[in-house]
């Protein structure tokens, strides 16, 4: 079944993945893990699909914020509406970079805007809009729809793990409800296995059984130490495979395995300016942790023969 | 496969269940629902297992509070430690009754005690203690372990639904982590499909990949309108079957189905003093709603030939 990993070069990284899967699935072996405990958790942005020049979700939010600023002049000099309307990608890109360095001032400004952007919308309306954006919208530099921005080797890895009895989850800092409409089609991961950030919700009864809508309040920002907490809350088990690409994934990667159990910890390194992007910003500490603890670093340049389908 | 419902008498209730399942699973029929959307959500206390003379979880909590009061004299005159130590079941029973009537004063006192009772404990320690209690502890009046307090007809119903391609979830006001150790064995529902109330959690890193422990803060009280919100948050779909037994289940029962989709809404009526219990307290409004909206009321006395295995 390792033949499924056809977009992976035959490097030590691929060998480490195959060796791990064989060890934990060999019945009677010292590292055997029963199928019900073969849980995997993968970050999404930068791990399963690309996140540059800015996270895909941000493009969706900006469209909505720009629409709001068109409709209401009083928003045009306020962030984040100003940046959205003027397509000030620098301000927006810096929000994420600053967050990775521990400064959440602008994240709060952006989040406040996002909360207002979707407040009152029903989860069904939001899902339909996100789905339309992901299928129709084009990536600004990669000449493909957002729907086709998943990394082929990672999609193959998810299929390979599933074939060996693993159950895959997404544990992303991105918005849970933004990803859900398309995760089954792209990754084979259904909505109930998507964990992510979320806004608070309201339930309003009506003659059709009620509607769930977004409140103008944050709920969970699923990053850093919140990742293992949300994983445990949702699954009730500790994963044995975890994949990430940034500092915010360190606690999730640490959490994989647990006392006396083997774990596979994958850290995707963006080092391929030609086929994808080349950056380490926001990943510095996770790369250090990988070196210290012997995690498996996945080099896009060296380990993947193909990046996108 | 309806033969699986062997502890159900051949009444209109059983007929309604069988007719619903046939309608939504008949391919090409007007009410057909594909397997991925055959989601069911069931309350636990009073719906899948018995909740009298007091919720099973409360017994577990009282043991822990009594231990604390033994160890620390300063707690002995304070509620809820006083009631726990003196086995004042009246005070405790009234907490739930008052909650059902909209008065949460004592719920807050009890919750504050519970938060202190488990703060700092790891989720693994808590799970082991809950598991031991449920397997070893005896129900005060029913002459059986708590583990054997599940209603046999409901267990058969879950199996029957599963055989028809439904995916069953628990959506309980009770503590998620208290139920998880035993839901797979009793109901065939694994931990990732248990939704319930929960305390806030902390992640503490250590040399074994870190531990998740309870904080002395509440997180979610999964009752009333919070039930549909938590169901949607966890599953990303609207159920088509919902089962409950109390006022707190009304929003979940309303939420089932949705515009233009058939739903089965079951309300368990406790009317069998001989074999289980006879009470309507806390269910008054849900019984009215059942009458108004034509929900299927399950009479323990009339619809079930056997109550427990």
Image: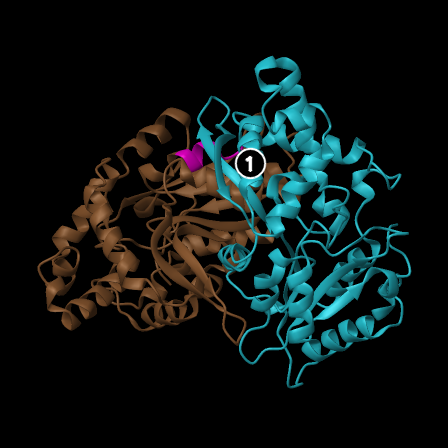
Chain colours: A brown, B cyan
Location of mark 1 (residue): B111
The local crowd at label 1, few if under 14, some if 14 to 19, many if 20 or more residues have their Cα within 10 Å, is some
* Any part of residue A17 in sight: no
Q: What chain is tagged by disc 1?
A: B
Q: Position of residue A260 (x, y in %)?
A: 58, 25
Q: Which residues are magenta?
A: A251-257
Q: Is residue B84 left or right of residue A65?
A: right
Image quadrant occupied by the C terminus of chain A:
bottom left
Depth check: B64 or A148 in front? B64
Asked where in the image residue A31 lies, by quadrant, the reply is: top right
Secondary element at tag 1: helix
A47 is within the stretch colored magenta: no
Where is residue B29 drawn, in percent x and y?
67, 85
Q: Residue at x 48, y 28 (%)?
A: B209
- Vertical order, A237 against A206 (above or below): above
- The quadrant in which residue B178 appears is top right
Residue at x-position 82% and y-position 34%: B138
Closer to us: A257 or A78: A78
- Image location (x, y in percent) of residue B139: 82, 38
Q: Residue at x 55, y 34 (%)?
A: B109
């Amino acid at each position: 079944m390792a033949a499924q990993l056809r977009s992976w070069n035959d490097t030590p990284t691929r060998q480490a993945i195959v060796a791990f899967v064989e060890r934990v699935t060999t019945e009677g072996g010292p590292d055997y893990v029963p199928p019900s405990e073969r849980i995997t958790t993968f970050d999404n942005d930068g791990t399963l699909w690309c996140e540059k020049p800015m996270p895909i979700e941000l493009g969706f939010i900006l469209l909505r914020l720009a629409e709001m600023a068109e409709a209401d002049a009083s928003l045009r000099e306020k962030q984040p509406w100003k940046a959205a309307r003027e397509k000030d990608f620098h301000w927006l890109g810096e929000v994420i970079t600053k967050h990775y360095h521990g400064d959440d001032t602008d994240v709060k400004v952006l989040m406040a805007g996002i909360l207002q952007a979707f407040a009152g919308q029903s989860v069904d309306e939001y899902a339909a809009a996100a789905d339309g954006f992901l299928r129709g919208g084009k990536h600004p530099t990669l000449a493909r729809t957002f729907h086709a921005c998943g990394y082929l080797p990672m999609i193959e890895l998810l299929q390979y793990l599933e074939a060996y009895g693993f159950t895959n989850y997404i544990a992303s800092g991105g918005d849970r409800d933004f990803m859900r409409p398309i995760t089954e089609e792209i990754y084979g991961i259904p909505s109930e296995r998507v964990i992510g950030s979320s806004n608070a919700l309201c339930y309003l009864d009506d003659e059709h059984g009620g509607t769930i809508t977004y409140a103008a309040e944050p709920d969970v920002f699923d990053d850093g130490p919140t990742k293992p907490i949300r994983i445990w809350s949702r699954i009730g088990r500790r994963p044995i495979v975890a994949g990430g690409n940034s500092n915010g994934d360190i606690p999730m990667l640490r959490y994989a395995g647990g006392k006396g159990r083997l774990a596979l910890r994958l850290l995707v390194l963006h080092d391929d300016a030609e086929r994808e992007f080349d950056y380490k910003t926001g990943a510095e500490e996770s790369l250090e942790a990988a070196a210290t603890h012997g995690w498996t670093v996945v080099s896009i340049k060296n380990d993947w023969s193909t990046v996108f389908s």
